[in-house]
Amino acid sequence: MDKEQAQQLITKYKKGLCNEQEIEILNQWMDEQGLDQPGYYFKSDEQENVLKENIRSQIKSSLFPERKKRDPIHLQTWLKVAAVLLLAGTIGIWSWNNYNHKPTEPYTSIYNPAGQLKTVILPDGSKVYLNAATRISFPSKFTAANREVTLMGEAYFEVVHNPEKPFLIYTGKVQTQVLGTSFNVKAYTNEPKITVAVVSGKVGVVAGHLSALLTPNQKADYNPTNGALLKGTITDASVLKAWTEGQLIFRDQAFNEITRTLIRRYNTHIIIQNDRIAGSILNAHFDKNESLENVLSVLCTYVGARYKYEGTTYLIR
């Protein structure tokens, strides 16, 4: 992939328009170039530190509300400046080679491809379950003041408790901070929202100038399109970890959202050719070794559709 093609694909990625195949191509190119997650550009270390310090201040205000908060007008002004720095589209693709968090330790970047599940142990002993088509990046040692990772995709975290060293996760425009807890983060670029859901402990979530403090059985949904951050409840938190054991559990999910999950899980192509059923809301539970054909057969029965395999694609009518 040449410079121009890479720039076009990155622009498409930042708009959330990449399909699974394009994400795979972009991830492969990133590995070849020795790069981390796309979408972050800074002109200097000072600008990067300004942005990260504002992010941390917001999250800490959520986790520890008794502390004095910054002046909201001053914070909002800085966040606008930070947003401009983040989204500046005039910086060329090769400025990526000059982008570095400049950590004291080298970074490790792990990509789990479609069709697979993977478990990663972080330097502090925290366990991370990676869902299909997911990338996580982190330093080889957590020697800085915070334990920081970046995520693109979906992961279930079991974070080792350490009140002296907060754990931060960067997923596009959403930043999550914890001290020690279990929670799930879903942040695929081709999904309409980023979701953080908590099983145990306390989690702070920041998106732009909005923030939410989550406790067990609560979640936060961020919509990149309108910038909304909505807090909600979870009826059954055990469902959040079910996918790490290979199960597929869908609760009040649209058929087209379910098919996107199946595409990643089974590393295949699925096209819904009937718009009438795309938005149908379903509830279903499939065990670890269930074949894709059986899954599609059950789902199609629910919505009154049929599927057909042509070439390398499942067509649903």
Image (spheres, rainbow, N blue to C red):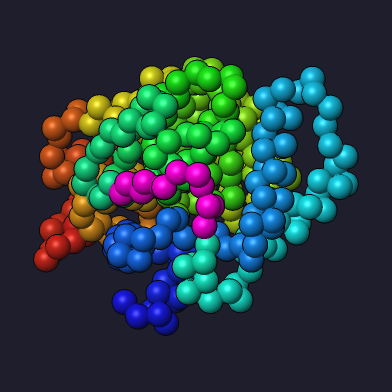
Q: Residue at x 48, y 74 (%)?
A: 94
- In the rendered image, residue 255, in percent from the top left (x then y), is placed at 36, 46
- In the rendered image, residue 203, in percent from the top left (x then y), is placed at 58, 26
Q: Residue at x 19, y 40 (%)?
A: 295
Image: 252 above or below 217: below
Taking the image as drawn, is residue 301 in sight?
no
Image: 205 above or below 43: above
Side of 146 relative to 28 (left or right): right
Magenta stretch containing residue 97, yes or no?
Answer: no
Side of 160 relative to 2 (left or right): right
Side of 146 relative to 129 (left or right): right
Quarter of the view holding residue 61? top right
User: In this figure, what is the number of numbered marks?
Assistant: 0
For the C terminus, the quadrant is bottom left
- In the rendered image, residue 179, in percent from the top left (x then y), is placed at 56, 23
Taking the image as drawn, is residue 145 in sight?
yes
Image: 194 above or below 274: above
- In the rendered image, residue 48, in percent from the top left (x then y), is placed at 64, 54
Quarter of the view holding residue 159? top left
Q: Residue at x 31, y 77 (%)?
A: 1
Question: Residue 291 versus residue 315: which sits nearer the camera?
Answer: 291
Q: Residue at x 75, y 59 (%)?
A: 81
Q: Which residues are magenta?
A: 100-111
Magenta stretch containing residue 110, yes or no?
Answer: yes
